[in-house]
Amino acid sequence: MSKVSIIGAGFVGSTVAHWAMISGGCQIVLLDVVDGLAKGKVLDLIQSGPIAGHAIDAIGTTDYADTADSEIVIVTAGVARKPGMTREDLVSINAGIVRDVVQRVVEKSPNAILIMMTNPLDTMTYLAHQVSGLPRERVIGQAGVLDGGRMKTFIAMETGISPENIHTTVLGGHGDEMVPLVRYSTIAGMPLTYFLSQEQIDHIVARTRDGGAEIVRYLKTGSAYYAPGASACKMAQAIIRNQHHIYPASVYLQGEYGLNDICFGVPVVLGKNGIERIIEIDLDEEEKTMMRKSADLIRSTMAHLGQPAHS
């Protein structure tokens, strides 16, 4: 049975644990520095097992020794966005947390695959890649699955068509300059323009980019966790089950899409080794411009890490 450790027992981390427990097939370790928090949440989760009929193989802990030999480590630890705060505002606070967490988990699980969820996502994934010393195939940022899911939701809401028939492609950074690729998004293989007006499509693209911030505005004291948790669980499943699914994910680029020394959302094939392949799709000039703007925004955030901002 695969061992999956989740670092951070806040709303996102505990929701990842919930989805993972429902999916089954893995032992779950939920860790948090706050004494009793992870233990209490796991106790609640495993008590739901006999009622809901799902697995109950999980522990809550404050001790990184309990995470040893994890196949996957999902990092959710960090401060969540508050109203008026962008993901980029979080960098100085969360960088210190991510450095400490990554060093500790890699020491205990040197063969693990890291799935990063801490915001600002692409910058924290870059930092985790640098700190961990792991190959880029094993340091993966979760963003595109969530952003694509949001876009799919908004298309379904506009058209009344089942999300199962909708395919979306959202690349770039996990922030205000993300790149929902309308040309590569379809409904049952047909272009979005067959079902939606340009005005509707523009509205969907704008709402997708604003998806996380919209939820923050409603919650006022927190950010999304159900959909992010489900997204991370989906990626972990693809790795554990060696499914070779194509998902957008933030990965360290070495020339792909004309970008170097940056973590950026692109389509990848996920399997037992983590990222099995990076897929480069043809982009038109407008799409390339959007990708460059997104990369520039990430680099401006990376500058707060004291890292080089060259391309």
Image (cartoon, rainbow, N blue to C red):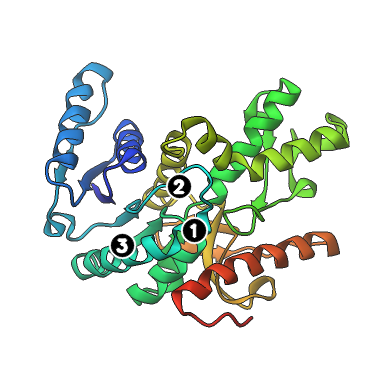
Q: Amino acid at mark 2?
A: Arg
The amino acid type of the residue labelled 1 equals Asp
Residue 116 vertical position relative to residue 56 in the rendered view, above or below: below
Query: Which residue type carries mark 3?
Result: Ile
Q: Position of residue 262 (x, y in %)?
A: 55, 73
> Closer to the N terminus: mark 2 or mark 3?
2
Label at residue 89? 1
Measured as percent of width and height from the top left, residue 83 is found at 50, 42
Residue bearing mark 2: 81
Number of residues whose C-alpha sits closer than 10 Å to that of mark 1, classed few (under 14), some (14–19) or many (20 or more): some
CB-based contact (under 8 Å), mark 1 and mark 2: yes
Q: Which residue is mark 3?
A: 97
Q: Residue at position x 19%, y 32% from top?
A: 56
- Residue 105 point in image, percent of width and height: 24, 63
Question: Which class describes the residues within 10 Å of circle 2: few (<14), some (14-19), or many (20+)?
Answer: many
Between 267 and 172, which is closer to the camera in this rendering? Answer: 172
Q: Is residue 226 left or right of residue 291?
A: left
At x 54%, y 35%, the residue is 217
Marks 1/3: CA–CA distance = 15 Å
